[in-house]
Image: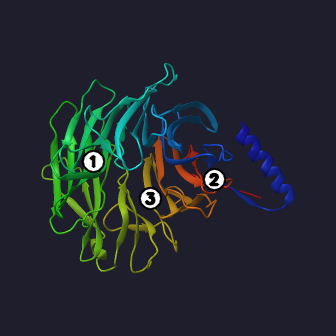
């Protein structure tokens, strides 16, 4: 009601003044006047009622974990998780919300950024009572590593956590998983000596099968591989495909995974071919043998250079940031749904950070930051309006993490990102935008 009143008052003022202004659909999640701390890594999830659940780290001397729940512009829940050891860092959270009302958080606790860490999870009841506590996710006697943050994925009330652990006796990094909504223990996916698992991505289908793709690097050679597993609940792990190269660690991009409405899994990644990037797309790779289609292959010689990794939605759209000989050095945002049709969502951008994508029937939404190095303005595009909309201008010349998180449920969609605090430009605070009709389009008032 407060937001509606403010909008009406602004409308009256603009009409009387005879000028025009744009009301951006963005709200700070924190008090912009509180300049004693800086935030990092905001994430968002939405439940089936359109309630938005946020988490981020708020750092001063060490970092605490913030959980905030909102419906429309009203706060309906707030928790702070303080590290047991003053000065420790609770960093890199992830979050999922379930239809039953339980929200799950995962995060790493580190004595110092860049050192050995331990991953924790917390199950938050809808009532916030009893007060939830952080419980250890990393198996006893093991540690994780800063920068290798835990990942949460869900389908309905079926929730999995994926997490990394240091390999005993060498510099390797293993990947493990655990189901959180059932009584479950630790399951290793990859535990090889002198091998580092990075950039794991996952999705869950309606049968509670976990689909996981990740990169696999050697610590003693140039060996690189990309793996995709399907992991049925209560069944055996299935290696559906593996691609590898023995000459360079620069061949494959980070992969991405999504599950469609018919439980078909989609896996996408980029690789180099004679200096150009090509997208490789797998549809339903659980079939044996897994088959793929190469996208952008007809454009070989156009100098495609993909920044980061591509993202795929449950609606089978693929988005990525890339430059080519036509765009020059500018990294634009692109969208594909097959190997012959490509849409350029931006034009003449100075640069663009890796986009995120989500699907909500019957629309697909893409969001991104304008500057891959310093965050910049926030943009969104959806298949209904089919045009890029600025949902938050660049508020400061200061740099912040360019990460942006995007979530959807039903007709609800929300984004979360960092923006430098104008009151104290060296500090960043968490921001959000949300919609109930798939579009973040700004309101132009006259």
Relative placement, left or right, of 263 versus 366 is: left
Residue 166 quadrant:
top left
Figure check: 446 above or below 137: below
Number of residues whose C-alpha sits closer than 10 Å to that of mark 3, classed few (under 14), some (14–19) or many (20 or more): many
Q: Which mark is residue 265?
A: 1
Number of residues whose C-alpha sits closer than 10 Å to that of mark 1, classed few (under 14), some (14–19) or many (20 or more): many
Q: Which mark is residue 421?
A: 2
Q: Which mark is residue 244?
A: none
Label 1: which secondary element: strand
Label 3: which secondary element: loop
Q: CA distance from mark 2 to mark 3?
A: 23 Å
Q: Position of residue 279 (x, y in %)?
A: 29, 65
Q: Position of residue 426 (x, y in %)?
A: 60, 56
**Residue at far left of view:** 289
Quickly name the residue at label 3: 355
Q: Residue at x 30, y 25 (%)?
A: 182
Closer to the N terminus: mark 2 or mark 3?
3
The quadrant of the picture occupied by the C terminus is: bottom right
Disc nearest the viewer among 1 and 3: 3
Q: Position of residue 352 (x, y in %)?
A: 48, 66
Relative placement, left or right, of 373 versus 178 is: right
Q: Are marks 1 and 3 in contact (CB under 8 Å)?
A: no
Figure check: 96 above or below 334: above
Q: CA distance from mark 1 to mark 3?
A: 20 Å
Q: Position of residue 185 (x, y in %)?
A: 24, 28
Residue 217 quadrant:
bottom left
Q: CA distance from mark 2 to mark 1?
A: 40 Å
Relative placement, left or right, of 396 versus 65 is: right
């Amino acid at each position: 009601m407060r937001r509606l009143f403010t909008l009406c008052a602004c409308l009256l003022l603009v009409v009387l003044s005879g000028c025009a202004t744009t009301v951006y659909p963005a709200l700070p999640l924190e008090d912009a006047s509180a300049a004693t701390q800086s935030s990092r890594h905001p994430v968002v999830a939405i439940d089936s009622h359109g309630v938005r659940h946020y988490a981020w780290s708020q750092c001063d001397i060490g970092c605490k974990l913030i959980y905030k729940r909102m419906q429309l512009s009203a706060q309906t829940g707030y928790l702070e998780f303080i590290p047991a050891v003053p000065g420790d860092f609770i960093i890199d959270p992830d979050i999922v919300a379930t239809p039953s009302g339980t929200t799950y958080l995962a995060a790493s606790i580190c004595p110092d950024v860049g050192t050995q860490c331990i991953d924790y999870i917390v199950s938050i009841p809808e009532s916030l009572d009893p007060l939830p506590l952080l419980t250890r996710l990393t198996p006893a006697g093991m540690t994780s590593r800063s920068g290798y943050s835990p990942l949460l994925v869900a389908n309905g009330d079926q929730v999995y956590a994926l997490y990394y652990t240091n390999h005993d006796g060498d510099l390797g990094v293993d990947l493990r998983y655990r189901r959180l909504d059932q009584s479950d223990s630790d399951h290793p996916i990859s535990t090889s000596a002198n091998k580092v698992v990075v950039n794991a991505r996952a999705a869950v289908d309606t049968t509670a099968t976990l689909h996981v793709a990740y990169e696999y690097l050697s610590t003693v050679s140039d060996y690189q591989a990309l793996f995709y597993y399907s992991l049925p609940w209560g069944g055996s792990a299935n290696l559906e495909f593996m691609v590898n190269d023995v000459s360079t660690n620069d061949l494959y991009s980070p992969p991405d995974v999504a599950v469609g409405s018919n439980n078909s899994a989609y896996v996408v990644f980029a690789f180099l071919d004679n200096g150009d990037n090509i997208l490789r797309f797998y549809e339903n790779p659980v079939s044996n043998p897994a088959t793929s289609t190469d996208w952008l292959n007809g454009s070989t010689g156009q100098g495609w250079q993909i920044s980061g990794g591509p993202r795929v939605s449950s609606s089978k759209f693929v988005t990525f940031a890339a430059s080519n000989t036509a765009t020059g050095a500018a990294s634009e945002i692109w969208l594909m749904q097959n190997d012959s049709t490509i849409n350029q969502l931006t034009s003449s951008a100075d640069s663009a950070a890796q986009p995120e994508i989500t699907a909500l029937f019957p629309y697909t939404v893409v969001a991104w930051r304008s500057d891959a190095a310093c965050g910049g303005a926030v943009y969104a595009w959806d298949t209904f309006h089919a045009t890029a909309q600025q949902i938050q201008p660049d508020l400061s010349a200061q740099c912040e993490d360019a990460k942006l998180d995007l979530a959807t449920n039903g007709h609800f969609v929300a984004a979360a990102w960092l923006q430098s605090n104008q009151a104290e430009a060296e500090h960043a605070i968490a921001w959000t935008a949300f919609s109930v009709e798939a579009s973040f389009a700004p309101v132009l008032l006259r």
